[in-house]
Amino acid sequence: MMYVVGHKNPDSDSICSAIALAYFLDAFPARLGELNPESQFILKRFGLMEPELIKTAKGKELFLVDHAEKSQNLDDFDKGKLIGIIDHHKIGISTTEPIIYLSKPVGSTASVISELYFRGILDIIGGKNKELKADIAGVLLSAILSDTLLFKSPTATPLDKELAEKLADIAGISDITAYGMEMLTAKSTVGKMTPEEILHIDYKPFDMSGKKVGIGQAEVIDMSEVASKKEAIQNLIDEMIEKEGYDMVLFLVTDIMKEGSEVLVAGNKSSFETAFELKLDGKSVFIDGLMSRKKQVVPPLEKYYSN
Amino acid sequence: MMYVVGHKNPDSDSICSAIALAYFLDAFPARLGELNPESQFILKRFGLMEPELIKTAKGKELFLVDHAEKSQNLDDFDKGKLIGIIDHHKIGISTTEPIIYLSKPVGSTASVISELYFRGILDIIGGKNKELKADIAGVLLSAILSDTLLFKSPTATPLDKELAEKLADIAGISDITAYGMEMLTAKSTVGKMTPEEILHIDYKPFDMSGKKVGIGQAEVIDMSEVASKKEAIQNLIDEMIEKEGYDMVLFLVTDIMKEGSEVLVAGNKSSFETAFELKLDGKSVFIDGLMSRKKQVVPPLEKYYSN
């Protein structure tokens, strides 16, 4: 049986894209971890069930969404059979056989799936051109809004916006911005979370030229939500450097309204400074315009570590 | 400026797909090596020019066809900017940024491009839905026939055949099989080639879990074409083991009509025997039904070397 699954520490794009693509592929939607508050809000809003939590790849056919890196999937990933990937990230996986792979540099995986739907070409990746119902349209819309931070992220493209408008029509959402703010506010229950929970809202480990690098991100509507917890988060990532074999761990507190991120740095400070061409005063820095881990944080680090 | 380019030691799919995709992308078709006799026959038959030979990636935007491995592209590949990949092979590349990637487990890269054309969806990979002229249809058809060995290869799918029939209509080819045999016969000038030339008709180096493995393939309509040159080819691949740091080099003489391949083995014999679960009597073995390097040779070797 085939499972459509997003990455570990799933964000809304991983959850919503798994649900939508599984619908078109007649497969099971799955997840590799707990839902964040935003994803919980979205599924409740559109009356959909949580994807099934899976713990092993053994005996499963897998169709990945929203990632193309083994380290972001199950530890026994190789025990499963990889059928395909729909994604919008860099390529970080190798296979021993040809698979279905469609990736585009757009704002979300949900955008890639939605484009296939609106063009009536889901069959090119093995899906069926079934009718899109309001609930599936709603989760796809939500995933686009979430991953593009209401189209403010540098990863957002005109296509994302165009697709979101069509999805909103089907989902019965008349004011996209109002819905998006409602969703982002639901996400920003950061204020009630413990530092550990905040760190793991959206945390991803990367293998960069053999070095282990971790990057977490939390998005807030107002920095004050996390102000009192920053020191504790810094201590947690410092501890990861000491105990978990990381070379560098970064934590981004992204202020959606100010359109920038405070970056907490653990590990080799001078590596960070070289990669980002700046000087740290202490252990953190606010970088104006920095919104996207994928587009603005991973590439300079990959480049730095490969040299 | 953007160049569409196939792999080193280009086969007809690499050459024809580069020409066709460059047409739809308004880019330049390029090649990384000399045309084999089959590709020469195809371009002459449809009156098209050879793609430009390029020797550096510096300053170029690159769109890859028919491969997704750096080792099969230019040595200074990283100096170029990778824009996208259209392919039907395994994934063996990693990137630092998201790119356009479309790969499907079908018989040829030309099939993937043709499907985009007939569906009118070339724009999903950044192309234009221009009219397909007879010459471009002809080279796409030829690439499908070449890569699927007239649909006899285990990599061939019903889609390849369906697309080939539509392309034949546009190209003005009334009898696909007759044209295919004519093309394969043109390819089989193997009899007039030197052992060195035969070895390099379609030779690819692979990085398998850090070990260097080479696999060459020549397709013949009759084994007698190469009978007198097998010993010399064996000597050449034995020499590559000694001098070029290879762990294993294989050379496949594929008999299209008998639907099987004689495999010449150089390097660690017992590794080959373990990977293919057979016993070698001497340095070569005929394997019935073995037609595809990609589907039947690379996967067991990748699996063997990863253990």
Image: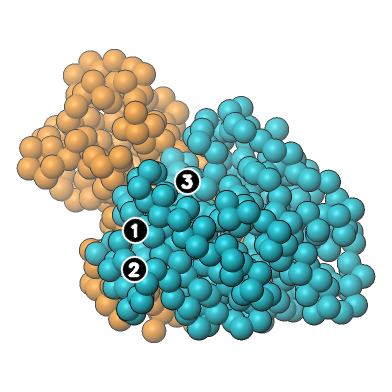
Chain colours: A cyan, B orange
Q: Nearer the viewer, mark 3 or mark 2?
A: 2
Task: Specify the quadrant of the image occupied by residue B83.
Answer: bottom left
- Residue A291 can be seen, yes or no: yes
Q: Nearer the viewer, residue B50 or A82?
A: A82
Residue at the spot of label 2: A272
**Chain for numbered disc 3:** A
Tag 1: amino acid: Gly
* Residue B170 spot, x, y in % from top left: 62, 68
Q: Residue at x 75, y 44 (%)?
A: A51
Chain holding disc 2: A
Question: Of B166 and B276, which appears nearest the observer?
Answer: B276
Disc 1 designates what residue?
A: A267
For badge 3, the amino acid type reads Ser
Out of A78 and B208, give the one closest to the viewer.
A78
Disc 3/disc 2 C-alpha distance (Å): 22 Å
Which residue is found at the position 23% from the left and 20% from the top?
A: B270
Q: Amino acid at mark 2?
A: Phe
Tag 3 residue: A71
Of pointers 1 and 3, the one earlier in the residue sequence: 3
Q: CA distance from mark 1 to mark 2?
A: 9 Å
Q: Secondary structure at mark 1?
A: strand
Q: Residues within 10 Å of mark 2 (few under 14, many from 20)?
A: many
Looking at the rendered image, the disc whose residue lies closer to the viewer, 1 or 3, is 1
User: Mark 1–mark 2 contact, CB under 8 Å?
Assistant: yes
